[in-house]
C-alpha cells in the first residue's frame, strides 16, 4: 500500500507521515520528495542555468515516483509525501503506480496558516505554498482529506489509519487513471 499525502509546502505532510509510522500496525517506509531532493548535490545544482535546473528537478521527481513504486512493488508499504504542483507529476504517478494500492490523501491548510508556518520555519520561501495552492488540489478527487489547521498531525494520522483499515470499494487513483485515459465513470 502507498499512502500518498498530497499538499502544499508547509501543510504538515511530513509531520503526519512521522505520526503514521508510529500509529500504523505494520511497518511502513516514509518517502518524502524533500528528502529525495536533499540527496542531490545542491552546490552543483545552483551552478546550472534555469532550464537545466528545471530539467534536473523534473528528473529528480520522476525518479522519486519510480523509487516509491519500486519499494511498493517489492512488497513494502510506503507513506509518500509529495506536492502535485505540476500536472505532469500526477500523470506520471498514475502511470508508474499502476497495479499498486494507492490511497490518495489531501492535506489541507488555509493560506494564512501556511504563510505563518513558512515564516516560522525559516527554511522555506514565504509564498511558495501560495503559488502551489491552486495546482496541488486541481484534480479535486481524494480517498480521504485532512486539515492540519483544525487537527494535530497525530489526530490526522489516526484518522488516516482508521480510514485505511476500512474495506476497499475502489480507489480514487484508479478513477483518476481511467479519466486520464478517456474513461468517463459517470457514463457507466
Image (tube, rainbow, N blue to C red):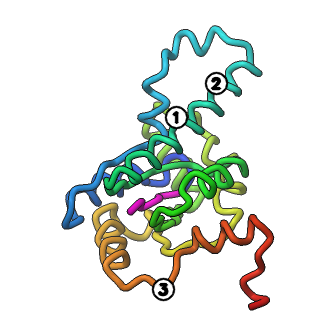
Circle 3 sits in a helix, a strand or a loop, which is it?
loop
Does the magenta-highlighted stretch encompass residue 5?
Answer: yes
Crowding at dot 1, Cα within 10 Å, few <14 / some 14-19 / many 20+, comes out as some
- Circle 2 or circle 3, nearest the eye: 3
Which residue is rendered at x = 72% and y = 83% of the image?
185
Does the magenta-highlighted stretch encompass residue 156?
Answer: no
- Residue closest to the eye, 142 or 178: 178
The disc, 2 or 3, on the residue closer to the chain's N-terminal end is: 2
To which residue does mark 1 refer?
124
Asked whether the residues under the numbered discs 2 and 1 touch, taking CB atoms below 8 Å apart as contact, a structural biologist would say no
Residue span colored magenta = 1-6
The disc, 2 or 1, on the residue closer to the chain's N-terminal end is: 2
Q: Position of residue 18 (x, y in %)?
A: 29, 52
Q: CA distance from mark 2 to mark 1?
A: 20 Å
- Circle 1 or circle 3, nearest the eye: 3
Query: Which mark, by number, is residue 169?
Result: 3
Amino acid at each position: 500500500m502507498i499512502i500518498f499525502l498530497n499538499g502544499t509546502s508547509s501543510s504538515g505532510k511530513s509531520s503526519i507521515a512521522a505520526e503514521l509510522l508510529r500509529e500504523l500496525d505494520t511497518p511502513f517506509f516514509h518517502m518524502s520528495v524533500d528528502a529525495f531532493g536533499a540527496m542531490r548535490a545542491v552546490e552543483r545544482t545552483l551552478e546550472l542555468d534555469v532550464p537545466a535546473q528545471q530539467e534536473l528537478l523534473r528528473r529528480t521527481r520522476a525518479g522519486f515516483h519510480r523509487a516509491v513504486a519500486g519499494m511498493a512493488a517489492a512488497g513494502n508499504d510506503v507513506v509518500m509525501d509529495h506536492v502535485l504542483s505540476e500536472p505532469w507529476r500526477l500523470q506520471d504517478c498514475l502511470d508508474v503506480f499502476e497495479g499498486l494500492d494507492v490511497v490518495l490523501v489531501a492535506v489541507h491548510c488555509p493560506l494564512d496558516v501556511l504563510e505563518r508556518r513558512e515564516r516560522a520555519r525559516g527554511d522555506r520561501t514565504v509564498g511558495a505554498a501560495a503559488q502551489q495552492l491552486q495546482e496541488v488540489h486541481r484534480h479535486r478527487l481524494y480517498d480521504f482529506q485532512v486539515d492540519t489547521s483544525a487537527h494535530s498531525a497525530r489526530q490526522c494520522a489516526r484518522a488516516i489509519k482508521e480510514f485505511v483499515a476500512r474495506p476497499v470499494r475502489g480507489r480514487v487513483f484508479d478513477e483518476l487513471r481511467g479519466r486520464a485515459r478517456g474513461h468517463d465513470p459517470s457514463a457507466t
